[in-house]
Image: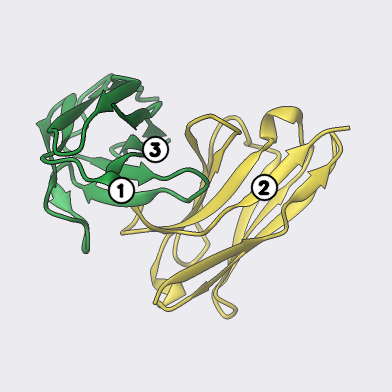
Chain colours: A yellow, B green
Amino acid sequence: QVQLVESGGGLVKPGGSLRLSCAASGFTFSDHYMSWIRQAPGKGLEWVSFTSSSGTYTKYADSVKGRFTISRDNDKSSLYLQMDSLGADDTAVYYCARDKSAVTAYDYWGQGTLVTVSS
Amino acid sequence: DIQVTQSPSSLSASIGDRVTITCRASQGIAGSLAWYQQQPGKAPKLLLFAASRLESGVPSRFSGSGSGTGYTLTISSLQPEDFATYYCQQYYSNPNTFGQGTKLEIK
């Protein structure tokens, strides 16, 4: 069965960095676009970034552009999100999600990892 | 960016009721719309995509319709496990955008 397991969240000070990972299993990872979506405490869902199946094409929300970098390792079936220059507004649960097909709906989600930016 | 507005933001209903949630996009999205259900503390779950196509394993009491800028999610007969927050999402253009959510509560 399809599984997505995020890790790497935690408490970080403003201006700090964090790298999230998402380990995928149960499907051919290299066939799918993958995305990061976040949810601030008590708030709605916000798309953050996606990467094409090969990793050559990426896009970012304006709120994170220039600070976050998405990447993937298809040999390891893993997705990553490098987050730099973090601010309080980045506090959220971060989900990795599988695109059902390129840039469409998300048919599988991880359980999420909480990132808290606070001094 | 395409703005997506859901209504209502909250809704109280009883077991067995029929409920409808509406999603309106700021421009036409040609049916490129998905609906998700989120239980407290859990990840969202895909219910429907392409406005009206039921995701595998989702009960048939969930249905979707609409075109252009207006879309609806209907639950034909509420079950206890349906009380949750629902989100729509447009994927017609990047960035994908979500509605603000509709919290469905037990009356």
Kindly identify the amino acid type of the residue bearing the numbered disc 3: Asn
Q: Quadrant of residue B92?
A: top left
* Image position, residue A63 (x, y; %): 60, 30
Kindly identify the amino acid type of the residue bearing the numbered disc 2: Leu
Asked if the residue under mark 2 is in contact with the one under mark 3, i.e. CB atoms within 8 Å, the reply is: no
Do discs 3 and 2 share a chain? Answer: no
* For residue B73, above or below residue B37: above
Q: Secondary structure at mark 1?
A: helix
Q: Chain of mark 3?
A: B
Do discs 1 and 2 share a chain? Answer: no
Q: Which is nearer the eye, A63 or A116?
A: A116
Q: Nearer the viewer, mark 3 or mark 1?
A: 1
Kindly identify the amino acid type of the residue bearing the numbered disc 1: Glu
How would you rate the neighbour count of disc 2 (Cα within 10 Å): few for under 14, some for 14-19, many for 20 or more? Answer: many
Q: Which is nearer the eye, A84 or A56?
A: A84
Residues at marks 1 and 2, CA–CA distance in whole angstroms: 25 Å
* Residue B96 tag number: 3
Q: Which residue is mark 1?
A: B81
Q: Which residue shows up at 86% across the image and 38% down it?
A: A13
Asked if the residue under mark 1 is in contact with the one under mark 3, i.e. CB atoms within 8 Å, the reply is: no
How would you rate the neighbour count of disc 1 (Cα within 10 Å): few for under 14, some for 14-19, many for 20 or more? Answer: few
Q: Nearer the viewer, mark 3 or mark 2?
A: 2
Is B11 on the left-hand or right-hand side of B63? Answer: right
* Residue A114 tag number: 2
Residue A58 appears anywhere in the view: no
